[in-house]
Amino acid sequence: MQRDRSMREKMKMRGASRQERLVLCLCGLLVMLTYARAFFGTEITDEAYYISDALAMVQGNIPFAYNNFSYGTGSAFLLIPQVFLYDLLVPDHHGLVLFTRLSFVTFRMVVLFLVYRTLQKHTKRSSALLAVCMMIPYYTGEIDNYSYNTIPMVLCLLVGVWLCDTVEHGGRYGAVKLVLCGFLSGIAVFAHPGYALAVLLFLALLICRSVGKNRISHTALYALGGILEVLVVMTGVVIQSDWQTLLRGLDLMFFHPYPTGSLSSISDSNKLLVLALLAVGIVCCCTVAYFIGKKWYAARLRKAGKNPEPRHTESFGAAFSIGAAVLFLLLLLLLTRGMTSLYLLGLLASLAAVMLLFCRRLRRPLLYYVGLYPVLFSLGCVFLVDSSDSLARFVAAVPALLPVLLLLLEQDDRWTKRCTALGMLACTLLMVCTNYVYVYRDEPITQLNTRVESGVYQGLYTTALRAEALPQLEGYLNQSVNSGEYVAFRDNVPCGYLMLHDARPLDMATWDCLQYSYGRNQPAALYDYYMRRQAIPQKIIYVDYGRDEHLSADDPDFLYNNFVNTYYEQTEDVALNDLFRRVVVYEYSGGFDGDFQYWIDASRMLS
């Protein structure tokens, strides 16, 4: 009898392995497509900022002590050791952008493998593979590289899965995993403080879901991991600067920042109204699809001579409604060729997770750990981030769909499983198509047919114009600056810092803190930065690449020009090429007496 049971188990595993082979092949294809996608498109602002800010920190722009402009300053921490080694091995940084992209894709794949290894312990391997398969092409949309958006999304997914395994199932190496979860959560919060909401949720789950004395030990181990991450970061910062400088930087960053004005053009109430209208529309459409699927499946069962059970028809209706919604989003993507479909998928995932939370009969522990934190984070960003683009925040909520779909895959109804699997494949197709249809701040991928042959963008494919213009700008900049000089770029040119070989950046961040493009006109914080560094740039370089109507240097009302015109003289004004239409270089001409406070007070009075 024991032998017969063993044979049945082997037969069952053999039958399951056929499904697994198919999904594994799909996973392999998706991994290849993801790596291939990394070679296409060049980006000279956002992505260049993420990489160049890490490079600037390696070169002395110490995070929090000096570099305290962005709430996402800590997103550079995973890049810093990589950029440091790359700088040692490749001094001119040729191919740096492609290297960081491939590194991040590899990082994501390793994390997803760990997620799969944990999920497959508590669900069918084919279901765990499908779930991971759906996440392979997902990187919060626009740029598949290290950033304050992508890093915490990847890490918190792993943290949620590991916490669920340890707390709910008593998984192996629980103490080690809890400490690692705290450490990874610390990295996520440093990368984007909004993920503090996720940490609060995880702490609440550790307290409420742990049993007996485990509540104290689980919470303590998780907190220990977070404290270790803070100590690692702050020890490095203090060694390079000092406590006084660090505390001054933190005070300016979090407690007493210089006033800047809002970037958002709509009120919080209007943001909420827009999201509510979209949510109501999605709920109404999905409800209609739910009842259509439910009625159709009930009729099919009756026709087959079977009695339709409510739990079967309801689960099929839910799977059908999600699948129908994703197919609609695919159609929308083909029409708009943008990111809107992915944003709406995140909103759909949020609504599905919240609705499942109130369905007590169907709830599973994984929902608490993986389905809720993306929703909390997205909602928090809508109201806490200074931006008008509230729908885009829900791109981070896509992982909330995972526990919902895994729950539907667990149902014992064959057609529900099939419909859910098709829905997950449709989600995967949506994200793959988004990645290939939409190229962030470059031309459509069909036009990216020319390889960049040198410089930091070497190895990437872009348009013929950019492939020629980018190395040309890099060559010109390095001819215009001297080794060891302090250099600043104005009008938001992060790629300029990335292209410098021997000069050193001197700015609060490689994203232009003056933000002339956004209508800001308050340079006091930059003067304070100069005072903390006890230095000013030897050269200030302006690059016109079509972002604004004119350079800020040409605006007589821009307050920073008072400082530039007093101590600098224009030495170069070149029409470089069709992409970088104008490059203007100002060189320090002497005369500054070190009275930074005068300029701080004067700019605050005038602004």
Image (cartoon, grey):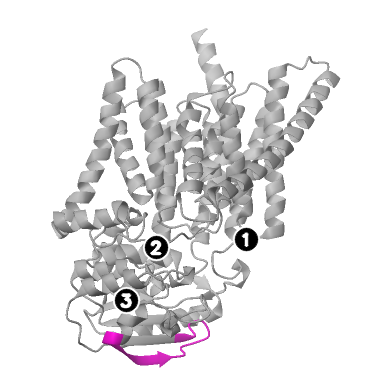
Mark 2 and mark 1 in contact (Cβ < 8 Å)? Answer: no
Q: Residue at x 67, y 44 (%)?
A: 277
Tell me the distance, in whole angstroms, between the alpha carbons under discs 1 and 3. 35 Å
Q: Position of residue 292 (x, y in %)?
A: 79, 31
The residue type indicated by label 1 comes to Val
The residue type indicated by label 2 comes to Thr
Q: Earlier in the sequence, mark 1 or mark 2?
A: 2
Q: Which residue is mark 2?
A: 260
Q: Which residues are magenta?
A: 566-582
Tell me the distance, in whole angstroms, between the alpha carbons under discs 2 and 3. 20 Å
Q: Residue at x 43, y 69 (%)?
A: 520
- Picture quadrant where residue 163 is located: top left
Specify the farthest residue to the right.
Answer: 303
Q: Which residue is mark 3?
A: 488
| Quarter of the rendering occupied by the C terminus | bottom left
Question: Please, what secondary structure does the residue beneath circle 1 have?
Answer: helix
The foreground one among 307 and 187 is: 187
The foreground one among 361 and 430 is: 361
Q: Is residue 192 magenta?
A: no
Q: Position of residue 4 (x, y in %)?
A: 54, 12
Q: Is residue 244 left or right of residue 468?
A: left
Q: Which residue is mark 1?
A: 437
Q: Nearer the viewer, mark 1 or mark 3?
A: 3
Q: Residue at x 68, y 19 (%)?
A: 311
Tell me the distance, in whole angstroms, between the alpha carbons under discs 1 and 2. 36 Å
Disc 2 residue crowd, few under 14, some 14–19, many 20+, Cα 10 Å: some
Disc 3 residue crowd, few under 14, some 14–19, many 20+, Cα 10 Å: many
